[in-house]
Image (spheres, rainbow, N blue to C red):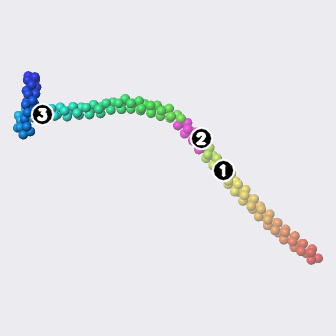
Amino acid sequence: MARFAVALAVGYAHTAVAYSAEQRGAMNPIRKVVTMLQAMQKKVEKEGEVEKTLFDKFMCHCKTGGGDLAASISAAEAKAPELGSSIEAAEGKLAQAKADLESAQADRIAAKSTVAEATALREKEAAAFAKEKAEFDTNIAAINKA
């Protein structure tokens, strides 16, 4: 039965080639169905090829992507202890820098107070010197007059 339908369809297709475009419009409905089925078959085959290409690309990505991801994960896991130790080292340096800063600030405050004390002492000594000089100058002037 199927062979008969195929032979009939081929026969109609063969005779349809001989007709002009106007006559094709008036063809029998079976030929129209056969033509539509053939067009659908071509379209489905094209879509199948596109889907196969996309599937192949996806599978390639799945195969290589897994390896890339595994390599990236292992690299990150290997780098994690290094980063942990570098963070600890940086925290140690930060603590040392803070201690150095506090020490420097304390030294600066001590230096300022020492400078202030020295300045006060120099001013006191300068005042005492000026007083003594004025007294000596007065005595020298008195001796020169006498």
From the viewer's perspective, tell me whether residue 45 is left or right of residue 83: left
Which image quadrant: the N terminus?
A: top left
Q: Is residue 54 magenta?
A: no
Q: Quick check: can you spot residue 9?
A: no
Residue displayed at 11% across by 32% down: 34
Residue 129 placement: quadrant: bottom right
Residue displayed at 55% across by 38% down: 86
Circle 2 sits in a helix, a strand or a loop, which is it?
helix
Residue displayed at 38% across by 32% down: 65
Secondary structure mostly taken by the magenta-highlighted segment of the chain:
helix
**Mark 1, residue position:** 104
Which image quadrant: the C terminus?
A: bottom right
Q: Nearer the viewer, residue 95 or 41?
A: 41
Q: Amino acid at mark 3?
A: Thr
Q: Tell me: residue 89, above or below residue 9.
A: below
| Mark 3 → mark 1, Cα distance in angstroms | 95 Å
Q: Amino acid at mark 1?
A: Ala
**Mark 3, residue position:** 35
Which residues fall within the magenta stretch?
Answer: 83-95
**Mark 2, residue position:** 92
Q: Is residue 93 magenta?
A: yes
Q: Residues within 10 Å of mark 1 (few under 14, many from 20)?
A: few
